[in-house]
Image (cartoon, helix red, strand yellow):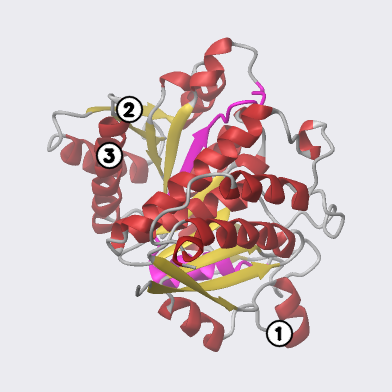
Amino acid sequence: MNELALRIAVMPGDGIGPEVMEAALLVLDAVQRRVGGFRLLLEPLEAGAAAYRRSGVALSEECFARAAAADAILFGAMGLPDVRLPDGREIAPQLDLRERLCLFAGVRPIRLLPGVPSALADPRAREIDLVILREQTEGLFAGRGRGLVTEERAEDRLVVTRPASERLFEFAFALARERKTRRGRARVDLVDKANVLGSMAFFRAIFLERAARYPEIEAGCRYVDATALDLVRRPWDLDVLVTENLMGDILSDLGAGLVGGMGFAPTADLGSGKGLFQPAHGSAPDIAGRGIANPTAMILSAAMMLEWLGRTRAVESCRIAAERIESAVERVYASGRIRPVELGGTSGTRAIAEAVAAELEAGPVDPLSPERRA
């Protein structure tokens, strides 16, 4: 039986990146043994602070070309606080990849897993299931490395264009429609600061134009400061929040804090036919090498990669594998068998990955799987 081979650029990066990547690969190996129809061809690529420290280049052109040619990019974490560019900024190959591959849609699901405590005491916190959708090619990040800095003054620019805004909002309403199919409700809220900034008023006007094309989906606008308040006060009422680059960056971390922490926050950076998948957390050099990093976000990011590959490459087995991983993660946490160190437990990186892999191994074997064919 022929299997579809999918080439995955694996970029572990720095700090805890290699550790959580190893955990995710263990889970991916386990799910491939149980679900057939596809095969992941992994291509390790080196980039990040360690590469910059050694060679003076954080993301070589060869590395970029290989990543760009892959079916998907699986990304650990890159950057270290003490490795900086001459202008004082940290190296950030992930931002270079977003810009050069036009990965405009930063998809940040915020969902509380069974058995994981929320920072909120309200029992309705169990219902938290929202997505922060972040525009990733413009906004304030457009000023990265291009701002004006003198002895007396520093300026960064905020860029909003109609084409980039329109494609983001189309993505947002398509995402909400898909969620409505699964969850029975759909709403998109624009998050901005249109009461102060002309660029945000422009952003809002484009959003309202697009929203008028989707009368079946509720739509609204809210200011970023009020949204931060509501993320703490009533996040269970929120569905899809679409916003500018920097605002989305900040709100994503707040959202992660509501559902256990950064170790539970997977992400997908998506463009036209291109996808990069990574945990929302950074390289965390303070705990690197200790085996205590929570790999759950990395494992769920790998599941997001499989779901995206299944949808964009029309490979149903990839979507099945994604569902298997997500379900295995939920069952493991619901059972109480693991509790990450960041939640006060003792389960290390490897133990969490092995628990999820064991849950997958205990599940059904599909007819096309390598184990059944053997």
Return the x and y of residue 56 as percentages of the image width and height: 71, 84
Disc number placed over residue 178 in the picture, else none = 3
Return the x and y of residue 216 as percentages of the image width and height: 15, 28
Asked if the residues shown at circle 1 and circle 2 are in contact, with their CB atoms under 8 angstroms apart, the answer is no
Q: State the separation of the CA atoms marked 1 and 2.
A: 48 Å
Q: State the separation of the CA atoms marked 3 and 2.
A: 9 Å
Q: State the separation of the CA atoms marked 1 and 3.
A: 44 Å
| Residue that appears at 71% across and 28% down | 336
Q: Nearer the viewer, residue 160 or 238?
A: 238
| Residue that appears at 50% across and 56% down | 34
- Does the magenta run of residues contain 109? yes
Which residue is denoted by mark 1 in the rendering? Answer: 56
Could you classify mark 3 by the number of other residues whose Cα lies within 10 Å: few (under 14), some (14-19), or many (20 or more)? some
Q: Nearer the viewer, mark 1 or mark 3?
A: 3
Asked if the residues shown at circle 1 and circle 3 are in contact, with their CB atoms under 8 angstroms apart, the answer is no
Amino acid under disc 2: Arg
Q: Is residue 290 visible?
A: yes
Q: Nearer the viewer, residue 337 or 127?
A: 337
| Residue that appears at 76% across and 48% down | 351
Return the x and y of residue 5 as percentages of the image width and height: 41, 75
Return the x and y of residue 233 as percentages of the image width and height: 54, 16
* Image quarter of residue 87: bottom right
Residue 165 in the figure: left or right of residue 89: left
> Which of the marked residues, 3 or 2, is nearer the chain's N terminus?
3
- Does the magenta run of residues contain 4? no
